[in-house]
Image (cartoon, grey):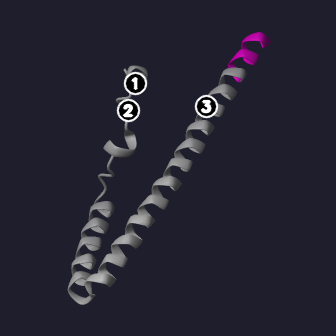
Amino acid sequence: MILEAIYNGDFYPSETVVPKSEKYRNALRACEKIMDQLAQKLTKEDYDLVETLLDQSSIAQCEESECHFKVGFSAGLLVQQEAEKQIQTKSYDE
């Protein structure tokens, strides 16, 4: 049950959910290929700088994803509340 997993600290969607689309897999392969090419062409210092850039970009993307998740989840709860009010109002009208 999801509530038990959340309570017990066993719910980690950001760590366990991975997109399964072909577009995602192709993008990962392209990134790996580009990184391999950069490793061959750049100095060690420049390549380390690229890795640092990617690390920081990943942190920023995770933060953005978290914000989107929170807003989306909150919007879903608001929709649920509004639907419940509509049902209650309809019940009283009958």
Q: Distance between the residues labelled 1 and 2?
A: 8 Å
Q: Are marks 1 and 2 in contact (CB under 8 Å)?
A: yes
Which residue, given by chain and number where applicable, does mark 1 sit on? 2
Q: Magenta stretch containing residue 79, yes or no?
A: no
Position of the N terminus, as image quadrant, is top left
Give the residue furthest to the right.
Answer: 93
77 or 82: nearer the viewer:
77
Residue pictured at 38% horizontal, 28% vertical:
9
Task: Name which of mark 2 and mark 3 comes first in the sequence.
Answer: 2
Give me the C-alpha separation between circle 3 and circle 1.
16 Å
Name the residue carrying label 2: 11
Please tell me in which quadrant of the rendered image residue 85 appears.
Answer: top right
Residue 42 quadrant:
bottom left
Q: Name the residue under label 3.
A: 77
Q: Quadrant of the C terminus?
A: top right
First-in-chain label (3 vs 1): 1
Residue 10 visible to an observer of this rendering: yes
The percent position of residue 49, horizontal first and vertical second, equals 37, 78
What stretch of residues is rendered in magenta? 86-94
Q: What residue type is labelled 3?
A: Leu
